[in-house]
Amino acid sequence: MILADDKIWDQNGFNELVRRQLGPSVDDDSGLVYAYDGNLKLDLLPASIFCSGHTYFVQAMFQHLRLEAYAVHTTFQYAGTEGKRHRLREAKVFYDPPEYYNPPGGLLTFKPAIPKNLLLHGEHSIDTHFALVHYQVIPPLWCRLDRLWFGHPGILPGSLTRPPFVCPLDHVFEINVMLKEMPNEEFGPWISIREYSLFENPSMPQEVKKSWLDVHLCQEGSPGCQVNSTSQSGALKLPKHRTEETLKTAFSKFKDVKVIQFSSMQDAFDGFTDKTREEQFRSRVKRYVGIWCCVENHTPGHIYYDMYWDEKPGWKAAPLNSTADDHPPW
């Protein structure tokens, strides 16, 4: 059937076969019905443990019901195969080779600090959702609203989604774009990413976990705040607003450290010394963000995320006025 008609793909081909002769019930009690011309017995599997991409990655239904998921299907997701793979990695159910956890050049992470008012105060609206998302960089990503392909009220009625929730990275970022090769001349060097749950993965080797440097940002001029100074706990103290060159100098003697963790990324980086490199970086990362979809009763109903929203006075999270305006903000 599938080979004979290029308009039929595996899912709807399977549906057609099963429904060709659906019923009757096998008996009054089991819930089983005959399918496929009476050759199969069909039953429904509980969505709480045989999970779709929505009940697992967004609703976390099995966790709310204190169950153990048996299977997950990467539906209700974005960014193609790369998005599916990243979701499975976030859930720690994707197998990667050992070198994935110990890459040459090491790993950079930070502790996100999100004000409680962005997480908990006010109604879960478009404005509060964008305010929350704009406060952070990966990892992990908190959302107030779900993302779908059609207009909806923010959270699907009847679902167990409890905002705010840790949403999949593909709800905001175009993972397929982040992992795509781009010309270095225009976009600068490729930027590798890892999932927020990386260090919680049982496959993470101890040698990586033990090779760790904490970096605490401090206000330049305050006592003890100078490049290469350390705190009593052994953390590196680093003045805020460092350029690319000063950061290279500060970390030059830690080349063998496998993990560097910043206490915060707020005001850590003040830009590139090389302005061409600066433009390449901006050209790359502004393509990393996607859309939120969708407001109800409006066409087009999606809203573009903007990596540099804070540089645009008066920027507001609002759907486009017309299809003529329907393009990314770059």
Image (spheres, rainbow, N blue to C red):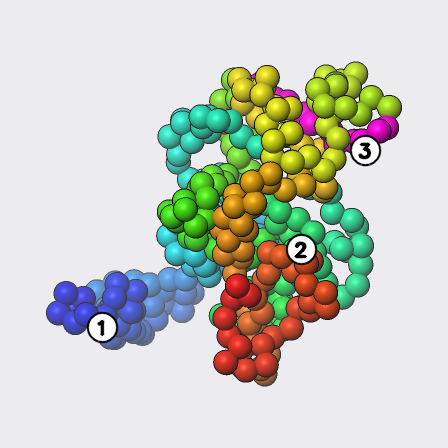
Q: Residues within 10 Å of mark 2 (few under 14, many from 20)?
A: some
Reply above or below: 293 against 196.
below
Is 200 in the magenta?
Answer: no
Residue on which the image places disc 2: 134
Q: Is residue 296 above or below residue 224?
A: below
In the depicted structure, whether residue 18 falls above or below residue 81: below
Number of callouts in the render?
3
Mark 1 and mark 3 residues within 8 Å of each other at the beta carbon: no
**For the point 74% across and 54% down, which residue is it?**
119
Q: Amino acid at mark 2?
A: His
Instruction: In this rendered view, identify the residue nearer to me: 112 or 186.
Output: 186
- Decide: few, some or many residues near mark 3? Use Cα within 10 Å; few <14, some 14-19, many ≥20: some
Residue 57 seen in this snapshot? no
Q: Residue 42 appears at what percent x and percent y?
A: 33, 63
| Range shown magenta | 209-222
The mark lying in front, picked from 3 and 2, is 3
Give the amino acid type for the residue marked by disc 3 in the picture.
Gln
* Residue that carries the numbered disc 1 in the rendered image: 7
Residue 304 position, x and y percent, is 56, 66
